[in-house]
Amino acid sequence: MATLTRSQAEELLFREALLIDTRRYDEWLAMFTHDIEFWMPAWRNETETTTDPDRELSLIYYKGRRNLEDRVMRLTSGLSTASTPPPRVMHVVSNVLLTAADADAAEVSAVFTCHRFDVRMNRAECFFGRYEYALRREGEAWLIARKKITLLNDTIPTVVDITSI
Amino acid sequence: MTIDTAAYVDDRPDEGIFRVNRAIFTDEQVFEAEMARIFEGGWVFLGLDAQAPGPHDFFTAFAGRVPILVQRDGEGTLRAFVNSCPHKGARLAQTQAGNARLHVCPYHSWSFDSAGRSKAVKWHKAGCYSAAFDQQDHGLAAIPCFENYGGFLFGSLSADVPPLADYLGEAAKLLDLVADQSEAGAELVPGQVTFTYQANWKLQLENCSDAYHFTSAHPSYIRVLERRQQETSGEVVASVWENSDYWKEETQGVGGGSYSFPNGHVLNWGVFGITPAIPLYESAAVLAERHGEGKRDWMFNMRNLTIFPNLQVAENASSQLRVIRPISPGLTEMRTWCIAPKGESDAARRQRIRQYEDFFNPTGMATPDDTVSYENCQIGFAGKVDPWLQGYTRGMTASVEGGNRFSERIGMNPARSVLADSQLCDETLYHAYYRAWKERVGGAE
C-alpha cells in the first residue's frame, strides 16, 4: 500500500482541528486508536519539558481513548462550571512535516496556535506549541496512535482543557 | 495606613456570629496591608530543601512581592537572600533553579559567591569610589529570618517574628506526616505547574479547607469516577476517591473533621483507610513499625493542610504542594508540585502522578471547577447591598476547644476541633484564617 503523503497528513490534522473547533467530539474521538497515547508534558525547567511520564509530571497524560472519552463526557455533561458555557476555540495548524512514513505507520510534526475566547469572563487567550503525531493505518483509515503536545506558554490562565491545545 | 479590621471581619463568638465582609477580597488598601504585614512582614514558605539538594544549588521564590534566592554554599549551608543586586537592584538569578558557585549580575557584572558574599565589583580600582563605599558590605542582603523545619524552608522579611517552631506550633506535626512518609524525606516530582486565576488569594486559602464544595463543584469529576468504577479496564486512571466514601452524602458516622491552630494554620481531613488506591500503600507496614499505627493511619487520611499564609499540602487524590502568590486583589498565581516520599517504587510513583494530573492540574478535571468558582465569587463580591458573607457558620455548634480522640493518636493539641459526619462540612476552620489575618493586618506598623 502507498505510504501517507504530506497532503493526506495535513488533511487529517486540519480535520481534527475542525472537529474540536466545532465541538464534534464523537467524530474527533473516532480519529484515535483505542490505545492512543495523548500526552502534554509539563516543563521541568525553563528550557526542557519532562520526558518520562511515569517518573515526571505531565500536564495531561492518557494511555487509552477511554480516558479521552471521560474528558469529553465531563466537557459536555453540563456538570462542570469550568466547561459551561463552552469557550469558543479556533486552531490554526501549520508547518506540517512528514518525518517518517511506511505502509502502515507515519510520523508527523506540526505547530499550532489555539485562540480561545472565554465567554464567561469575556477574555481572549492564545495558546501555542508543537504537535508530534504517530499515525497508524487501521483498515482503510489512518488513525492517531499518539499525539504529543508541547505547550510553549504553560502558565495556565485558570484552565486549559483538551479543546484549547 | 491603618486598617479597621472590624469592618472586614465580624467575630462575635458569644453571639454565634462570624462574618466576613466581601470587601476583604477586593479592597486595594487591604491588599497592600496584607502584602506589607503578612507576606512581607512574617513567616512565609519558600520551598523545600530538596529543591537545592547539592553544593551550590539554588532555587528562587517570592516573599510577597520580593524576589528571594535560596542558595546552598559549597559546605552545604542553605541561606536566603533578596534576589536583587545591591548595585542597581536588578534581579540576580533568572531561573527557577540551578547551580552556581558564582552569581554574576547580568547588568554590571557585580559577582557573589554561593554564600552571598561579594566576590568582585567590576573595575573597582578604577572606580574612584569614596572610602564610605569601600566600608560598605557589597554582598547580597540575607533575609532577616530563615529556618528549616523537616525540609520545609520558611523565611521572614521581618526580624520581629517568633522562632519558626513557635509559629508552626502543633501544626508542625502535620508537616511531619508529609516529611516522614520516607526516611529520606519528601521530594518534588520533576515538572512544575503554574497557573493564575482572576480572584483573591484568600479564595484559594479557603477552598483547600472547604469540604462543603466537593459534591457541588466537582459532580463531573465524580461522574467520571463512577464510570471508571463500573469498569475493570486497566486503561483507566484509578483514583483513591472511588475507594473512599467519607465524602458521600449517604455515609453515616464520623468521617473526618477539622483542626485549627494559632497563627492561622488549619487542617481539614477525612478517613481514607489503608487502601491500595493510595500510592503509600506499599509502605503501610513499615510506616506502622517505624512511627506507630496512629501516625501511620494519619498518613493515609485525606488531609488538606494550610500553613498560613502561603503553603498548602493537599493529600487526597494524590499529593500536592501549593504555594500561593498574591499578585493583586483580583489576581493570584499558584505554583504547584506533586510532592512524594523519596524512594517510592516505580508503580507507586506512576499511580501518584496519574491521579495528580487528573485531579490537581489546571489541565485536569477538578481544579478548573474550583478556580472558575473563585472567579465567579470575585465578580459577585462587587455586590455590597449586604456586604457580609454567610459562609463561615457551618459547624458553629460542633466546634470545641482543643483536640479529640483522633488528634490524640499523634499527640497533637490543636486550638479547636470539629468531628464531622459527611454532611457537616465545617466552616469554622476559616475562623483561624481570619483571626490570624486580623491580628496581622490590624497589628502595629
Image (cartoon, rainbow, N blue to C red):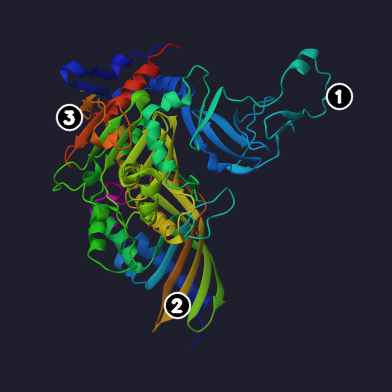
Vertical comparison of B73 with B215: above or below:
above
Q: Nearer the viewer, residue B61 or A25?
A: B61
Q: Is residue B52 above or below residue B141?
A: below
Mark 2, Cα crowd under 10 Å, few <14 / some 14-19 / many 20+, is: many
Which residue is farthest right? Answer: B126
Amino acid on which the number 1 mark rests in the picture? Ala
C-alpha gap between disc 2 and disc 1: 69 Å
Q: CA distance from mark 3 to mark 2?
A: 60 Å
Residue linked to disc 1: B126
In the rendered image, which quarter contains the C terminus of chain A?
bottom left
Instruction: Look at the numbered discs 3 and 2 and tell me whether their residues touch, using CB distance below 8 Å.
Output: no
Question: Magenta segment: does it hold B43?
Answer: no
Could you tell me which chain the residue with mark 2 belongs to? A
In whole angstroms, how far apart are the C-alphas of marks 1 and 3? 73 Å
Residue placed most toward the observer, B390 or B434:
B434
Q: Nearer the viewer, residue B26 or B336?
A: B336
Q: Amino acid at mark 2?
A: Arg
Q: Nearer the viewer, mark 1 or mark 3?
A: 3
Which residue is found at the position 29% from the left and 15% from the top?
Answer: B6
Q: Mark 1 and mark 3 in contact? Answer it, CB < 8 Å.
A: no
Confirm whether residue B197 shows in the render.
no
Q: Dot 3 lies on which element? A: loop
**Can you tell which quarter of the image residue A72 is in?**
bottom left
Image coords of residue B102 (percent x, y) = 71, 37
Which label lies toward us, 3 or 2? 3
- Magenta span of residues: A75-86
Residue at 42 percent across and 46 percent down: it is B181
Mark seen at residue B398: 3
Asked if marks 3 and 2 fall on the same chain, the answer is no
Q: Position of residue A107 (x, y in %)?
A: 52, 73
Instruction: Chain letter for mark 1, please.
Output: B
Which residue has dot 2 on it? A136
